[in-house]
Amino acid sequence: MTEFGVGTYTRNIVRALGRLDAESDYYLIGPLGKVAEIGPLPPNFHTSPLPESNSAIKSYLDYRANLKRLNCDMVHIPHLFWLPRNLPCPHVMTVHDVLDHMYRARDQSGLRRSLHFFLTHRALKGAARIFAVSNFTKSEVEKLFDIDSESPYMLLVADVAEEHRIAMTEEEEKLFGIDRLNVPRSSIPAVTHVDYSARVQTVHRETNPRFYELIDQFKQKTGCPVVVNTSFNVRGEPIVGSPEDAFRCFMGTEIETLAVGNCFLRKEAQNPALKQNYEHKFELD
């Protein structure tokens, strides 16, 4: 738990769940010092110590034992390469987890790359898979997904409606790893995972008029009422919290355009002297 990457992500999940769900029991499993960095927890959140160990095998065994003792019915592990086998309950993945998996394979080759895809495939195969997607009305949600309720806080997972799915061919069924992941599964492929599910957020004009109008304009231009919603940062960097943060990330990455409030910036129109090198700027989490 640090101010970067997975630490920020984990704290945000815990705090959001604390505000939204006062009935379910949640357990934070890990070294007590790191768990304490999250801050005060609601009454339905509990801690379960997991001492740090230099032995991966011992850590795996202790973790599984914790899940069994607590009788957990679902678990989320931000670092999915630290994913014990034969867990006593299902694990879930978020879009952040999948992107992290794909990023790690970018510069690998040979045996290490094959091992990476094997581990990614194993994590995907066993997960209750979750993706992030935002759309703007309840009626549009019902047209695209098998869900009959609103999801303003992006906490619900739904299957893509049958009429929007694309069945895989026999040749595509034989693919593995990133090749299989890249096969379009629906008319909205950017948010559809290999099991035809997506993580849904509904947006309302009354609560977020600017975002609502953006999605509405996107629909008018493309016919698609859905956009991808994910955090604004690179791996190891805190989520941007100011226009200055956003501009630095914009100039340090391959992002082509940036919208902040009423300002719209194109990369080619910026002063080249302001470009930054993000490649080694942040320590990977």
Image (spheres, grey):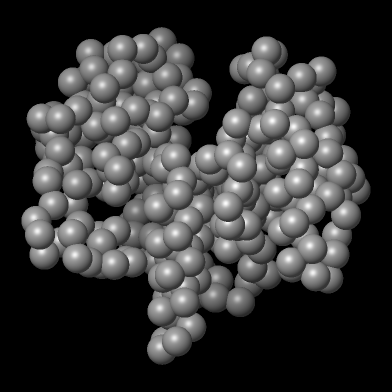
Residue lying furthest bottom in this view? Answer: 110
Q: Position of residue 26 (x, y in %)?
A: 71, 28
Percent coordinates x, y for residue 161 in the rendering: 19, 28
Look at the picture and state if 42 lies above or below 186. above
x and y, in percent, of residue 90 in the image: 53, 40
At x 55%, y 71%, the residue is: 278
* Residue 221 or residue 13, whichever sits in front: 13
Q: Quadrant of the C terminus?
A: bottom right
Residue drawn at 10 percent across, 30 percent down: 163
Corner quadrant of residue 266: bottom left
Q: In this view, does 113 lie above or below 96?
A: below
At x 45% / y 87%, what residue is drawn? 111
Q: Nearer the viewer, residue 256 or 63?
A: 63
> Which of 44/277 is in front?
44
Quarter location, residue 166: top left
Q: In this view, does 259 lie to the left or right of 5?
A: left
Q: Is residue 278 above or below residue 266?
A: below
Left or right, 125 with reference to 112: left
| Image coords of residue 252 (percent x, y) | 50, 67
In the rendered image, is residue 208 in sight? Answer: no
Image position of 274 with respect to 107: above or below: above
Q: Which residue is drawn at 74% across and 50% down?
A: 63
Tell me, yes or no, if residue 30 can be seen here: yes
Q: How many labels does the image show?
A: 0
